[in-house]
Amino acid sequence: MSPKQNTYFFGGGKADGDATMKNLLGGKGANLAEMGKLGIPVPPGYTVTTEVCTYYMEKGKCPPALEAEMQKELVKMSEIMPGGVKFGDAENPLLVSVRSGARMSMPGMMETVLNVGLTSETIPGLIKKTGNERFVYDAYRRLITMYSDVVMEKGAGIDPEEHCGIREQIEEHLQKVKEKKGVTEDTDLTADDLKKLCVDLKKIIKKVLKKEFPDNPMEQLWGGILAVFASWNGKRAIAYRNIEGIPDDWGTAVNVQAMVFGNMGDTSATGVAFTRNPATGENLFFGEWLPNAQGEDVVAGLRTPMPLNNASKTPDQKNIKSLEEAMPKLYKELDAIQKKLEKHYSDMQDIEFTIQEGILYMLQTRVGKRNGTAAIRMAVEMATKESKGFKITRDEALRRVSADNLDELLHPMIDPVAEKKAKKIAKGLPAGPGGAHGQIVFTSDAAAAWYKEGKHVILVRNETSPEDVHGMKAAEAILTAKGGMTSHAALVARGWGKCCIVGCSALAIDARGKKLVVGGKTYKEGDVITLNGSKGVIYEGALPMLPADPKHNPFYKELMKWADEVRKMKVRTNAESAEDAAVAIAMGAEGIGLARTEHMFFDPQRIGIVRQMIVSATLAERKESLAKLLPFQREDFTGIFSSMAGKPVTVRLLDPPLHEFIGDLGAKDIAALAEKMKTSPAKIEARIAQLHELNPMLGHRGCRLGIAYPEITEMQARAICEAAAALTQKGIKVFPEIMVPLIGTVAEFKNQEAVIRKVAEEVMKETGVKFEYMVGTMIEIPRAALTADEIAKHAEFFSFGTNDLTQMTFGYSRDDVGGFLPYYLDENILENDPFQTLDQVGVGQLLECGTRLGRKSRPNLKVGICGEHGGDAESIKFCHRVGMDYVSCSPFRVPIARLSAAHAVLEEKAAKKK
Ligand code: PEP
Ligand code: MG
């Protein structure tokens, strides 16, 4: 069915739509409408809805009523624009821009065509009206360049070979013209040069694309609109959607808007700004501008822009004129508008403006992308004190900081001591924070391919374009020679929280020759460099990195405090050493949810003894090695219990997949083992062969080991209990939770529980010290979840081991999933890697039923999760909904778990309100 209304008008202080209509009008269209309503000077225009796009995708044509609606809107635009301009009028032509605008911002992914409406008929009229022939032909050559690329090539589905695209051929021709004239800047070309250039470009287009450049305004307009629709299904838009998880069926809106020109001379300008600094979060108006230029010059990084005001200047930009200095009155007007916009939206805005002959126009406003550091600072400041006439709630502040934002704050930085001594290669603009090192590559395909081989790469480009997203995603960091803080590279990197430096003009990049010359030295593909994305400095070689240091960030600490006040679930950590436990406590961990005791045995001092224990053929042999392990284990537990000082510690009994210990033993290891065990290497080899398993992850591990060899469980229980008794005697609070792994039946649990309790009683008797402890189990086999009511009659706590539970529910070996998972993700058979993000639909049911059945038998059953999913934001929210008491994750994920647990409560509140 045709949509009822295909176009929505804005301008002249009125608008058909508003900011709430993002789904229909796209983000840009909805915000243009909202700005129009607010009385902010927006050039008039109309939005063709996303419904028209989806209709077009389905039917291959536009709704029949669209044409008449568009004609009406063009008349309204004429009425609002000064000077009686009309679209296609020979005397007094109105030019329009055609821009895409999806529901969610997709920086540079979609298409834009400017100056639509310039033809052989309208050009003389515009020259007469403006008295500026150069300006008109400059506008025309921009239209030709964009239109041929966006509409005639990409829009027509032509996929040229690398470096053969029409845009590149046009740029090359332009470069030749400039070289011939001996000039470097486009602005050095005269009206005659540009006029001739336009004739040449149309010839190139005819030759390459075998089509005439259209000379009819309406044909240009339709071409632009349909090309925007087609761009929704372009390669780069699809790649971006896949990365960002944007559904394919949203479609894009198209905004047709009266052109205003920032390149009409010295009283004209254009710029991009943020109402607060998007890199630091500081409450200072921040941006970039270019005099006598069009907006795309700033966004595309074709000219390096200038700072908007003093607050935007870096120390070496002190002498560059800001807009504040060059046009103080207009700057004041812009400043007032930015304040009004931030107050209206109660959030930092990313705005685009153009000044045409002394008149300021706002082209766009949207909630600005920001890095993690900035997101946290803005959220906390906005919720702490009223500024710009508004204040947000603490809940809202928490909502505005994502798990990814926090992750970014926790990014590694270059070791400052090493950085001082390092060889500096060059300096650029600090576009994405943190430090990174890697091997340089010069194309995105190379970046993606090297990444697949497990290499760390830094993508080095003159500037990036949306075609580069796959390479940018694969790269550790991005470095560009051109562009500013709002260039494509900077926006995308910031959105992803990637280390990035832009506008490093000292770099001479030869992408085809795969080399880079800087400071007289050549760096080839594969050479290693380090970037400091927070300062914009590039170094030779790989510098050592320091883990991120959130400790000194007051905004982070404040936000975490608020999260802790809101969340209901506790957050524990997975740690096996006192050092890791200490790091986790500093990150806010409230206990240990999983100490994997087999990890304590990887130490070179112990691994030999563990191997002896595993290959022991007799009870006596095994007891001998266990006796050697006991003091080590006691020491481990003493260390962990004391550093957790009274906080609960879940110690899991041995769960070693045997192949991890004896799978890859070489002749030397076997000889050493034989010598220690006073036997022959051949006998050891025979024993290893006997122990060999075809499916070790489903083999003799977990409680199966303790059941076959109870002396192992006895030794571990003894080490735990003796450590607990000794510390209790010293007055140090301990609370061990002894956890049995890989239970599938209640009988397995009962068997191991009996061994543990017997040892605990013995130790209490021997030492005369009473200490509290619990015995519980991992739930990591589907059968355990399904019979949780039986198990909970005996087990005092449950901890879901979702790594194994995922393995056994899907039937995917967790060690071998890498072989087929990429195909599954590519083919959309799986949406995510289920070992990373909990499969809520399937595995989630087992978590829900395990918890429910367990609590049926034991209402106060303590339930947690200690698989990798305990550190994943979406999975954590699911755990909250299931009613778990805590999540446990690796130390560096603890802050993310604290925030996500708070988000879970806030989402629940919001759902209840609805
Ligand atoms: C699990 O299976 O989720 C778990 C935590 O145990 P492991 O990863 O050690 O098997
Ligand atoms: Mg497990």
Image (cartoon, rainbow, N blue to C red):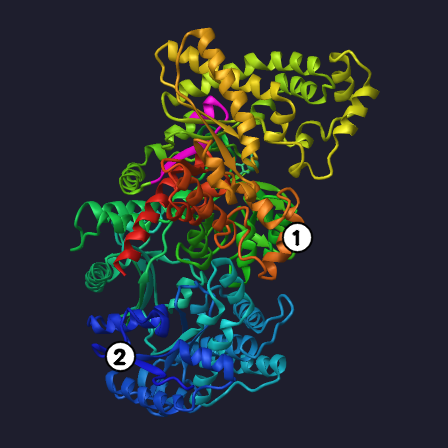
Read off the residue under disc 2.
16
Secondary structure at badge 2 equals loop
Q: Quadrant of the C terminus?
A: bottom left
User: Mark 2 packing: few (<14 Cα in 10 Å), some, or many (20+)?
Assistant: some
Let me know if residue 535 is in the magenta part. no
Q: Name the residue under label 1.
A: 820
Q: Which of the four quarters of the rendered structure image does ligand 2 lie in?
A: top right
Residue 723 shown left or right of residue 34 in the figure: right
Label 1 with label 2: CB-CB less than 8 Å? no
Residue 197 in the figure: left or right of residue 284: right
Name the spot of residue 475 as percent of width and height, x first. Answer: 55, 49
Question: Residue 618 got which mark?
Answer: none
Q: Is residue 887 visible?
A: no
Return the x and y of residue 202 as percentages of the image width and height. 54, 82
Magenta-drawn segment? 569-581
Q: What residue type is labelled 1?
A: Phe
Which residue sits at x=59%, y=45%?
Answer: 807
Is any part of residue 165 visible from this angle?
A: yes
